Image (tube, grey):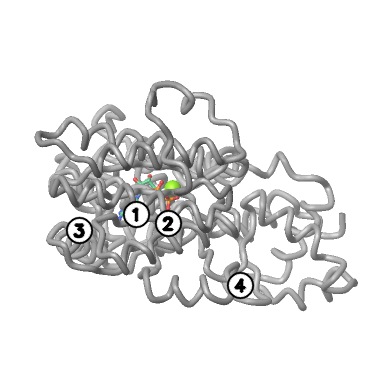
Amino acid sequence: MNPIQNPFSPGAGSPPPDLVGRDEILEQARILLGRVAAGKSEKSIVMVGLRGVGKTVLLNEILRMAKDADYLTITMEAHENQALASLLVPGLRGVLFELDRLAGLSTRVKKGLGVLQSFVSAIKVKIADIEVGLDIEPLKGTADSGRLEVDLPSLFEAVGEAAQDKNKAVAIFLDEIQYLSKEELSALIMAMHRMQQRQLPIVLLGAGLKVLTTLAGESKSYAERLFMFPEIGALADADARKALHDPIERAGAGIEAPALEEIVRRTQGYPYFLQEWGYQAWNQAPRSPITLNDVQTATASVVQRLDANFFRIRFDRLTANEKHFLRTMAGLGTGPYRSGDMAEALGTTLQAIAPVRAKLIAKGMIYSPAHGILDFTVPLFDEFMRRTMPDAGE
Ligand SMILES: Nc1ncnc2c1ncn2[C@@H]1O[C@H](COP(=O)(O)OP(=O)(O)O)[C@@H](O)[C@H]1O
Ligand SMILES: [Mg+2]
């Protein structure tokens, strides 16, 4: 059928034709934004889930809601090798400048800029574009200890007070939160703790792989009190059918029930896969309605595309040893996997696998959803590993 009219949108962060099955989380976000804007406290939200389940799409939707609710917003995406401070400072500076432009003199906003300047002067990372533009005296002695866990709460406090003074609220959006270092994550938690204690209008909307397991002690217990961690996963079968069926109907075409069932079975309801299969099935079908046969024809090219892109993204950056580790994991079947079982399957000890395990976590291939447990970060990755390395012995 005509690819120009194809309603599906496979791709990282691409908004789906229908955002199906996510009403509950969107409602939670609406309540959070409403309460904080009204000066009440509420738990911030960090969405956790595998790649391709729709976390970025949800963050973008909540960003729209925040803008509609007149929030000042900051959007950031963490990376493997980028300091949190270097991500945050430009956004916070933008917020303070916007507050400064709003009617009414505010010493709090000026103070906020001074605190930001002193924060910048104390951080050890170099941030090229922060050095310009702030011809403001640093407020010495605040947020400039050089220790993030101390300075970030002070900085947030100054920004929060400035926003409160101008009757504004600030929403910080942080994607790929699993890339923060332990120190950065706990500094962020301490900063949000300060917001709650002082009832200041800053909320955090985060998304990423499950990260709480890397935290310990105080920051862990704060995190549990300060944040909701809704799990974003595959769609239920009825929602998955709807995510395929409705956009096709709206585009003036149809899909037969067995075709629908086949896609739901193949994708196991994972949003990214639904978009890929829907997209290819549409293009493969000579005419409406899309039949089981069309889907089966499409499957070969979908699998090929997934193997070449989605699954392969980081695969090529792996060493032979790392690939062997992942292939051994896949050889144990469907996850999650116990670290102990992995050591045994590799014929070695837990201690001996620790370095390769750590490297694979840093590269975003696997993660640890709970103590002593490992899993792939991408759904159906075990099948990909078995396909791409049929020979387990290497
Ligand atoms: N609720 C949903 N229903 C159908 N498709 C969705 C849904 N949420 C996301 N998608 C699709 O899934 C894909 C991955 O979304 P993305 O937000 O990038 O996932 P993540 O950030 O979790 O890796 C995109 O192609 C998007 O269109
Ligand atoms: Mg994403």
Quick one: which residue is furthest to the left in this view?
A: 103
Give coordinates of residue 280: x percent, y percent: 40, 40
Q: Residue at x 21, y 37 (%)?
A: 99
Q: CA distance from mark 1 to mark 2?
A: 6 Å
- As displayed, is residue 115 above or below residue 238? above
Residue type for callout 4: Pro
As rendered, which of 165 and 77 lies closer to the eye?
Answer: 165
Name the side, left or right, on which 393 lies relative to 226: right
Q: Nearer the viewer, mark 2 or mark 4?
A: 2
Q: CA distance from mark 2 to mark 3?
A: 21 Å
Read off the residue under disc 4: 336
In screen coordinates, is 276 left or right of 71? right
Residue under pointer 3 = 33
Q: Which mark is residue 153?
A: 2
Q: Tell me, for residue 99, which label it has, or none.
A: none
Q: Is residue 277 above or below residue 42?
A: above
Compared with 232, 184 (above or below) is above
Mark 1 sits on what residue? 157
392 vs 61, nearest the viewer: 61
The residues bearing labels 4 and 1 have C-alpha atoms spaced at a distance of: 40 Å
User: Which quadrant does the N terminus fall into?
Assistant: top left
Q: Nearer the viewer, residue 80 or 186?
A: 186
